Image (spheres, rainbow, N blue to C red):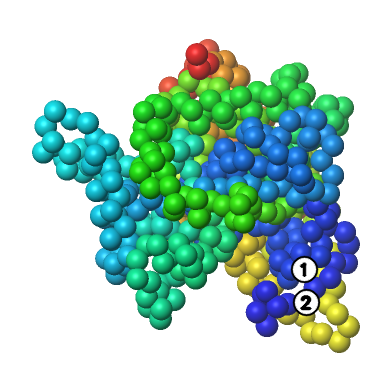
Amino acid sequence: MPLAMASWRLAMSCETFPFDAQEELSFKSNPAIQRFGNRLYIDQTSIEFLSELLLIAVSEKKVGQTIISGILPSYSVLKNWEQAQLEYAPKARLNLKLFSFLGASRLGSRHISHRDHYADLLQELKPNIITEDSNRKEEIIRTLENLFVGFQGAGRGRTWCAQSFIPISKGFLSGETIWNETEAKKNPPENWTSILERISTYLTMNKHRFLARGGEVLYLQICNGLRQTGETIRQWVEQNGLSLHTHEQNPEWLRNELDLELHNLMNRCPSTLTDIAEFIDQGIESNTSRVTDQSKGDHRWVSAGWCANESWQEGYLFAIELLRLCKADLDMIDRLNLLETACSMQVLRTLALQSARYISSEYSIEWPNYRMAVSDSDEKRPVIKKISQNTVKTMEKQIFQSIRRNGVILPQGEKQPDRSLNEADKHYAGKLFIGLAKRIGFIVPRRGRGARFVLNERLLRFLVITTVPVGGRLTFDTFKRIVERHHGIVFDAQGFSRANKWTEGKEIFLNSDTDSWLQNMLDASGMLIHLSDSCALVENPSGLRN
């Protein structure tokens, strides 16, 4: 039975935000979507999580009938948001993609109508290039093409329209467009105009194959976190030892600061580059953007789906991490790389925390109710490696069980659709966690047995910059404690003992040093200050952005 055709109904309520999604087909047909939101998918890359999140942020949006022109809904809209869908209006930017990526796409995907329209764009562009030497216009065009293809983010090997840019500017953010190659072979379009006249035949903009809705889930989690009351946030922080600054416990303050910083992020790129991109996309030929970005005289609105209502907690932490990364004094590419990492870690945290909410364990440990034991990438000691490996296995098992327990009741007389459950686990649940963690270097090896948690330099920088106050310092022990509460990550002997309790039901005494490698790694990265043999400070080296 195909996953989309499986028939399910809930045994217990799975509340969703921003509206009750229990009658939606994808909700009823996929237990992982019930648990984690619509949808987190294994084929979406880290940069595509970030690009989709920022695409929603910069696009015009509406909550019900209320138009949202800023990055985030106002605090008033957030507080009063009840049972109304979030919709956004992404731009397709086909002219810009054609100009930038046609030469970087598969030869077989370059339909003659695409090549002809590309040639037309170049001819229209030439009169707009002002230079004393008219012979240099071709050279300038080639320079611009090389410049823009250098911002290629994801999709190498795909058709040009299915590729995407690094999200360095709002002028580079676009929705997903798929060229229907099979249909084009059956009914070849005469030219680009005929494609636009039958756009739904030749181009698909609603499949979510690459921008697979993960960024939508992350955006909704942020909104869900920011709509909580200040008292709710303060009680949650105190009960779980989350160590947030006083102002960070104020959701209205956090909303305003994050809205400002994300706006600044999208406008930090030189305006000349954004202006050129906008001109290529719409200035020399506007009919394409008019057809792709509008529907019946209005914006082409896309529904942003939903997330699990309980995920407001990880959404709030994610909002704080994004704000700290935006405020840090980092160069643009470094910041984007760390924001990518933040998105990936948020997906992992969502899978881990949401599954923990549905799996009651007799081996109770403190928030976040799971532990990931991180060991040295060159670790040789079997007991240390074994505990780390056990936390990987237990995490995957917990996610596996969460989409099977307290979740679904089949219509009377139907057999359990194991195929549907296995499909959900393979693409939306446990395998997603393992696959994404391996892609970002959080789990090694990439292939083979003995998978365990480790850190690479980018992950370490992410943890320091989002944990240690910008330009400030924390003791090494305080740093480890906050990382454990925010991410469930442990490094030292006491943390490994808690991890062993989570996996095996009993604490374990380790007389060996399990975290000296972390101090060495911090030291080598310039993020550790030794005060004495027994005391060290972890320093956020980024400083506060001017």
x and y, in percent, of residue 51 in the image: 51, 45
Front residue of 168/13: it is 168
Is residue 335 among what the camera can see? yes
Q: Residues within 10 Å of mark 1 (few under 14, many from 20)?
A: many
Front residue of 473/143: it is 143
Query: Is residue 514 placed above or below 436 in the rendered structure?
Result: above
Q: Secondary structure at mark 2?
A: loop
Is residue 514 among what the camera can see? no
Is 419 positioned to the left or the right of 275 in the image? right
Instruction: Name the residue located 32 percent from the left edge and 42 percent from the top edge.
Output: 148
Image quadrant in which you'd find residue 23:
bottom right
x and y, in percent, of residue 64 in the image: 77, 46
Tags 1 and 2 touching, CB below 8 Å: yes
Quote the CA–CA distance across marks 1 and 2: 7 Å
Instruction: Name the residue located 79 percent from the left edge and 59 percent from the top edge.
Output: 21
Q: Which residue is mark 2?
A: 7
Amino acid type, residue under disc 1 in the picture: Lys
Q: Which residue is mark 1?
A: 28
Query: Is residue 416 placed above or below 334 in the rendered structure?
Result: below
Amino acid type, residue under disc 2 in the picture: Ser
Is 140 positioned to the left or the right of 416 in the image? left
Instruction: Name the residue located 83 percent from the left edge and 26 percent from the top edge.
Output: 230
Instruction: Name the residue located 88 percent from the left edge and 67 percent from the top edge.
Output: 11
